[in-house]
Amino acid sequence: MKRVLIVTFVLGLAAASLFAVDLKTSGWNTIVSTAKAEGQVIFYAWYFPDYFKEAAADFEKLYGIKAVVIIGDQTANFNKAIAEKNLATGTIDAMIVGGQWVKTTMDLDLFFGPIKGVLPEAHQMAPSLWELQEGVLTKGYLAPFHRNQTGILYDPNRVKNPPQTWEELVKWIDENPKEFGFCDPSKGGTGQSFVHTVIAKTTGGLERYKGDSDVVPSKVANWNLAWKWFTDRRDKLTITMSNNDSIIRLNGGEISMTVGWDDNVSDQMSKGNLFKRAKMYIPQMGLAGGGDTMGVLKNAPNKAAALLWIHFIQSKEQQLKKFQKVGAYPARIDLPLEGTLLSEQDRAKNAIAWFPAAYKNLMINEFVRNVLMK
């Protein structure tokens, strides 16, 4: 009986010491030792199952901490996290955050942090993605995981001097009817990126939208100028049905230039669905890019292990492995890569951030109503 009481007392002290650790100020060595005492991390994602399976094994081998990776439906993952929000201790330690869920989860104050000042190599990750994701100010709570970027994809046999500025692109479109294609923004992100840039160039830029949680009507009052730009060129633009449809039409010679995702274009090239001579760049006028992040749940049972897991996934070795395995561009800015369609310099100079999700949703709906349905 005494032995049981002693063991219980020791375990109680261990739990109390874990509870007492302030992960924001304790230092990285303390976080690592605390993570090892926690013994596991429970991580939710909805893609890259093969990569995460290997990463989990690597993590356990390196630290002796079990990584439980749950690959589930995106909406189901977030609904679970939200449903557990008010529990003292939830069942999720860390999760990937992307898309419309950035605003929802930030509004609900779902994450522990900020963690930018906690992770040792935070300064090596894309600065813009630490600050802003899907147009939402994330304030250092969400850690960059990987980046994606849209750019102009073209056939160099048919486009000798690809346009860089807005004026050059408009001139090229006007002089080459139906040769420029972009996908319906309600069907794919590449179309959303192009319409996003058209709004920026025809209505006064994007800065005024930064940080807005909801649409401010006065800020979209002149979007009719963007819709007029499209309707004036109805006979000069080719609207495709999806991101892949744009690539298929370029590959088949129907169009000469379009907008693509860097990772999707690489994937389609590797599968033989796009000719190898295709080139891609981010024009000086700017096209949108972003990426996904990882967050630690505020009521995570294993916060230290979650921080260590994120640090591990952000490491040079894992960022490179992820790129080689699934083609996802690293979030690190100090990782030179060969054979990429877009250079780091290109991204730094010409990539632009999305405006907030509320404006993106309005943009899609208004494009359908004012352009496609007229």
Image (tube, rainbow, N blue to C red):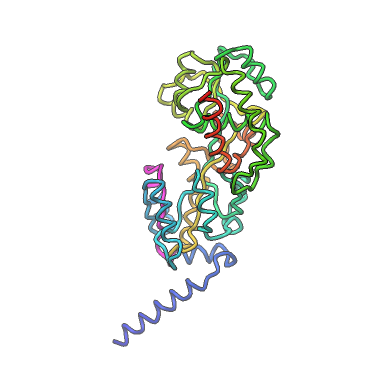
Residue 368, horizontal then vertical, whole percent: 52, 29
Instruction: Provide residue 245's location: percent of width, then percent of height.
Output: 45, 23
Q: Residue at x 63, y 46 (%)?
A: 127
* Residue 123 spot, x, y in % from top left: 62, 50
Outermost residue to the left:
1
- Indicate the position of residue 67 as horizontal and vertical percent values: 39, 55
Q: Is residue 243 above or below residue 290?
A: above
- Seen as rendered, the residue at the extreme front is 374
Residue 211 painted magenta: no
Place residue 237 in its image quadrant.
Answer: top right
Residue 261 shows in this picture? no
The residue drawn where x is 57% and y is 36% is: 289
Q: Quadrant of the N terminus?
A: bottom left
Q: Please indicate whether residue 58 sits to the left or right of residue 352 in the image.
A: left
Instruction: Tell me if I can see residue 78 in this picture.
Output: yes
Report the label total: 0
Point out the stretch of residues depicted in magenta.
36-54
* Rendered image quadrant of residue 342: top right
- The answer to whether residue 30 is above or below residue 134 is below
Q: Which residue is at 63% across, 24% downward?
A: 228
Residue 168 drawn above or below residue 207: above
